[in-house]
Image: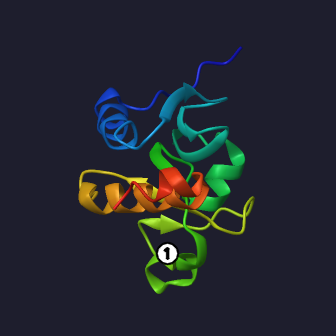
Amino acid sequence: MTAHAAVPIAIVTRLRAICLELPEAYEERAWVGTRWMIRKKNFAHVLVIDSGWPPAYARAAKSEGPLTVLTFRSGARLEASRFSKAPFFKPVWWPDIAGLAIDAQTDWDEVADLLAGSYRLLAPKKLAAQVE
């Protein structure tokens, strides 16, 4: 089995702090990287693109890497112009998924807002209503 680049622990730690504040959210190891779930639905997934792997992410982000990326659900907001330019990108595997390249300039308040929105889209209404 080939070893792939791991997400820097500082990034996982920041995302964990955001995601696990959400009602009933939990973390699990994904096929690559780490993901956060509500019930059985993935509302956030972080991984590293490196040497063009994984290829679907490399194509979507238009980067061979190394690049840490976060994907999340965005709903109707995906049509907003901000999702069409860097640091955002548009994966093709779900109509309402968006991607974000994470780097030193990442606005973590914006990430928290985006992930809360992703959670609200997928969570049961009663849980979603608990999130501002």
Q: Residue at x 61, y 44 (%)?
A: 42
Whether residue 3 sits left or right of residue 128 in the image: it is right
Q: Is residue 76 above or below residue 47?
A: below
Coloring scheme of the render? rainbow
Q: Nearer the viewer, residue 111 or 105?
A: 111
The residue where tag 1 is placed is 83
Q: Residue at x 56, y 39 (%)?
A: 37
* Rendering coords of residue 46 (x, y %): 50, 41
User: Which residue, as the protein is rendered here, is positioned at the far right?
Assistant: 93
Q: Is residue 40 above or below residue 114?
A: above
Whether residue 117 sits left or right of residue 8 in the image: it is right
Residue kind at label 1, given as amino acid type: Phe
Q: Is residue 99 above or below residue 80?
A: above
- Asked if residue 102 can be seen in this view, the reply is yes
* Rendering coords of residue 129 (x, y %): 45, 59
Whether residue 21 sits left or right of residue 39 in the image: it is left
Which part of the image, by quadrant, shows the C terminus? bottom left
